[in-house]
């Protein structure tokens, strides 16, 4: 199933073309111009049939999403987030096929109606008014389909465009909100195959981070950083987040947070005897404040109780450390869902706020670790440079003695 999805992406990537941000809007306008002329010729009957094509596409997209989602869930639930990309392509196929069939029907109706009109020889009043209204109505109902089609043309654009934002509306409507815009997707997902391969490699992700070789650590960290940059795009976020939340469940992140909360409560009770008699909401408020002010200390205490906690949260730390603020907030909402609604943890704290504190801590922790790595690398380079200079000096000294 993963290979099938990757093949779909490979076909999409072949659509990459330079300058699409300039010529795609022109094609869109051409589509509208042609639709106006067709509307003038076939009048309202073609408009009605095109509305039917839109309805067929919307219903077909819902059916396609449900069918594909069922298949994906049977093979690999982690890939469920990629289904909307396939739905967009299927919607385009449904729209064009249904339009073709309905256009043939339209031609047959047009010939029949023209034949009847000739026999009756009616007085043609307001002929041009009806033609113009027919052209305009056909132009209007052509807009969603044209936006859907031109959205695919924008798949290779590198920068976010205003027209790309508009095409999203056509995708949203014709896929019944089951598909996603493909505009600019190639630039965002050039390394998506690498990310998918690494994230689904159980031999890497199932191991403790500390047990990985230096090469494996570098591969994993680079891939997780790339994943973070990718999921800063909402479309990719929706696709990859099931994999991340699955790892969170497997590593019992909710229990790790619970351990930190428990340590905080123990310390609070020692320092503030009135805590036990406080109301439930007040206890949550006190606990959250204490955690925020003492998160580093609490984490160190938890690490002494569970020395492997560093290994278990390394994946999450690297991803969170490279997220923008909006994506971080979206991920917090997803992690909130990992914690059982009837669990004890929700009775002790506001889970969303506490996860936010924890994420901010991980982000800062990742930043500091990267700074240390840069300093170590810089130190090694400086040391190598000094050794090189010393060696040159030694050679020069020896040369001087020989003279």
Image: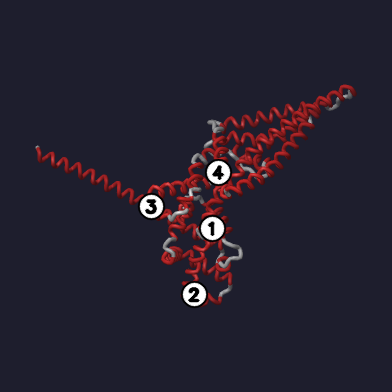
Which of labels 4 and 1 is toward the front?
4
Mark 4 = which residue? Answer: 2
User: What is the distance, in whole Å, between disc 4 and disc 1 at their CAs?
Assistant: 22 Å
Residue that numbered label 1 is attached to: 249
Earlier-in-chain disc, 3 versus 1: 1
What residue is shown at x 62% (from left), y 44% (from top)? 84
Image coordinates of residue 23 in percent, x first then y, are 59, 30
Rendering coords of residue 381 (x, y %): 30, 46
Q: Are marks 1 and 2 in contact (CB under 8 Å)?
A: no
Q: Please report contact status of discs 4 and 1: CB closer than 8 Å, yes or no.
A: no
Residue at (53, 47) in percent of width and height:
231
Residue labelled with disc 3 = 371
Q: Earlier in the sequence, mark 2 or mark 4?
A: 4
In primary-sequence order, the first of circles 3 and 2 is 2
- In the displayed image of the protein, which residue is found farthest to the right? 120
**Spatial distance from mark 3 to mark 4, Cα to Cα?**
36 Å
In primary-sequence order, the first of circles 1 and 2 is: 1
Is residue 348 shown above or below 13? below
- Asked if residue 48 can be seen in this view, the reply is yes
């Amino acid at each position: 199933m993963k290979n099938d999805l990757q093949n779909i992406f490979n076909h999409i990537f072949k659509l990459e073309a330079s300058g699409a941000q300039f010529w795609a809007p022109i094609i869109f306008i051409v589509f509208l111009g042609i639709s106006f002329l067709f509307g003038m010729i076939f009048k309202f009957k073609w408009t009605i049939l095109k509305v039917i094509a839109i309805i067929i596409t919307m219903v077909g997209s819902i059916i396609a999403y449900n069918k594909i989602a069922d298949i994906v869930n049977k093979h690999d639930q982690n890939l469920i987030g990629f289904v909307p990309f396939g739905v967009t392509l299927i919607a385009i196929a449904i729209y064009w096929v249904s339009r073709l069939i309905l256009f043939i029907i339209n031609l047959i109706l047009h010939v029949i109606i023209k034949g009847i009109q000739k026999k009756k020889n009616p007085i043609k009043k307001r002929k041009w008014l009806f033609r113009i209204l027919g052209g305009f109505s056909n132009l209007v109902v052509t807009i969603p389909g044209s936006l859907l089609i031109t959205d695919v043309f924008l798949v290779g654009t590198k920068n976010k465009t205003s027209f790309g934002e508009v095409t999203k509306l056509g995708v949203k409507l014709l896929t019944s909100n089951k598909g996603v815009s493909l505009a600019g997707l190639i630039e965002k997902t050039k390394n998506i195959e690498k990310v998918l391969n690494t994230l689904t490699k159980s031999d890497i992700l199932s191991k403790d981070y500390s047990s990985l070789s230096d090469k494996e650590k570098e591969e994993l960290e680079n891939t997780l950083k790339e994943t973070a940059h990718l999921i800063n795009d909402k479309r990719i976020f929706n696709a990859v987040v099931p994999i991340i939340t699955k790892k969170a469940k497997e590593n019992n992140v909710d229990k790790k947070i619970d351990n930190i909360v428990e340590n905080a409560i123990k310390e609070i009770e020692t320092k503030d005897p009135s805590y036990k008699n406080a109301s439930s909401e007040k206890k949550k408020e006190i606990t959250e404040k204490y955690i925020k002010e003492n998160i580093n200390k609490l984490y160190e205490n938890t690490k002494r109780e569970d020395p492997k906690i560093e290994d278990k949260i390394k994946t999450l730390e690297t991803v969170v450390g490279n997220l923008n603020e909006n994506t971080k907030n979206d991920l917090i909402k997803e992690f909130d869902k990992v914690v059982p609604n009837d669990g004890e943890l929700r009775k002790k704290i506001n889970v969303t706020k506490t996860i936010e504190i924890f994420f901010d801590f991980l982000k800062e922790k990742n930043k500091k670790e990267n700074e240390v790595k840069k300093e170590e690398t810089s130190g090694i380079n400086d040391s190598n440079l000094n050794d090189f200079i010393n060696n040159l000096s030694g050679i020069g000294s020896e040369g001087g003695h020989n003279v």
